[in-house]
Amino acid sequence: MSNVTLKQIKKSFGSVDVMNGIDLEIAKGEFCVFVGPSGCGKSTLLRLIAGLEQVTSGTITIGERDVTEAEPSARGIAMVFQSYALYPHLTVRENIGFGLSLAKRPKAEIKAKVDAAAEALQLGHLLDRKPKALSGGQRQRVAIGRAIVRNPSVFLFDEPLSNLDAALRTQMRMELTDLHKKLGATMIYVTHDQVEAMTMADKIVVLNGGRIEQVGTPMELYNNPVSPFVAGFIGSPKMNLIEGETAASLGCKVYGIRPEHLRLSATEGRWEANVRHVERLGAETILHLEAAGVGSLIARVAGEDVPDVGTKIFASPLPGREFRF
Ligand code: ADP
Ligand code: MG
């Protein structure tokens, strides 16, 4: 069953069109990630769903209800932003329950809801602390707690992990995935980080210039990107994309091969190449090659037994792993 339906959503700011006709269905309970480069319209689309911006045309349905004209508070959504915006003078308990207190809900109900949210977020032992005595990750969990107590039918997240350091982001990714399983709620999550999209999403929506490039599961996008844009956006290091004469000689406009799908040999192969840079990451090594007639290629290989800078080698695409656009 679809929980959020967008039909022909368009949005202009003055004479600038930033959303160019978005059609999308998000299923109940789905973890849907909007991903794309900065400025592609991710936040705008989320804010349109939230009702913080009005659509120029098109319709938004949440549940069975057309909410296109509805106030944000009447849409059954809760939003979590990159900045947590907690009240510094209130405790964690008071911060999480703030909206309920404001709505004059009974004390016992507020306590029960805050306790349940704190339990889901492992904040139980921190309820009497003030925000300044919390780590960044804990503060973001409090902000998520504030969303949970509203019991929304849809959670909206706008780059909630961007302020956290890399190690904490990895941990929070898993916590959010666990939370999604626990709550079974529909979640729409905006990020520019394809790793977050790949690791958390049931469904990824790749946006480019206010248009949907592709919708699919993480592995569908990895295995079957429909355009060079998606091919280059999903996966790290980025897919090698070759245009021009080389691509034409291979029967296409853009030829793509992922770094992990190049096989290297000292003696033979499709392309003769020079090793320009060697990035040893420990478990794997990234090789930057300059191939005759092709240009720069990146290869990703396992282990430490790799060619030195300046060595001549041969690189070959793994059969069945080439893309032609
Ligand atoms: P993203 O979140 O993907 O980085 P945004 O949705 O914030 O992108 O912005 C998409 C485009 O809309 C950008 O070109 C941005 O400058 C423009 N934009 C966003 N909000 C406004 C606004 N209030 N007024 C004018 N232009 C805006
Ligand atoms: Mg944004």
Image (cartoon, grey):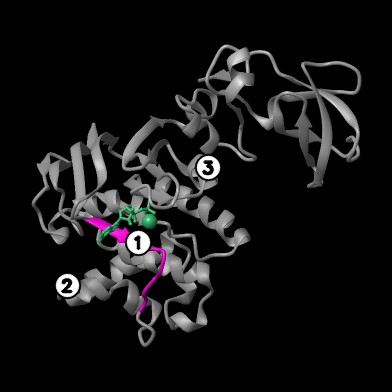
Asked which secondary structure carries label 1, the reply is: strand
| Horizontal and vertical percent position of residue 257 | 64, 25
Residue at 91% in and 39% down: 308
Residue with the mark numbered 1: 80
Q: Earlier in the sequence, mark 1 or mark 3?
A: 1
- The answer to whether residue 103 shows anywhere in this view is yes
**Is residue 81 part of the magenta span, yes or no?**
yes
The image shows residue 291, relative to residue 59, as above or below, that is above
Q: Residue furthest front?
A: 245
Residue at 38% in and 42% down: 31
167 sits to left or right of 133: right
Give, as a three-letter code, the residue at label 2: Arg
| Horizontal and vertical percent position of residue 47 | 26, 55
Give, as a three-letter code, the residue at label 3: Thr
How many residues crowd around disc 3 within 10 Å: few (fewer than 14), some, or many (20 or more)?
few
Residue with the mark numbered 2: 105
| Horizontal and vertical percent position of residue 318 | 70, 18
Residue at 68% in and 13% down: 319
| Contact, mark 1 vs mark 3 (Cβ under 8 Å) | no
Indicate yes or no: mark 2 CB to ligand 2 under 8 Å.
no
Q: Earlier in the sequence, mark 2 or mark 3?
A: 2
- For marks 2 and 3, give the CA distance: 37 Å
- For marks 1 and 3, give the CA distance: 19 Å
Q: Nearer the viewer, residue 93 or 11?
A: 11
Q: Which residues are magenta?
A: 77-86
Residue with the mark numbered 3: 199
- The answer to whether residue 148 shows anywhere in this view is no
Q: Nearer the viewer, mark 2 or mark 1?
A: 1
- For marks 2 and 1, give the CA distance: 22 Å
| Horizontal and vertical percent position of residue 141 | 44, 65
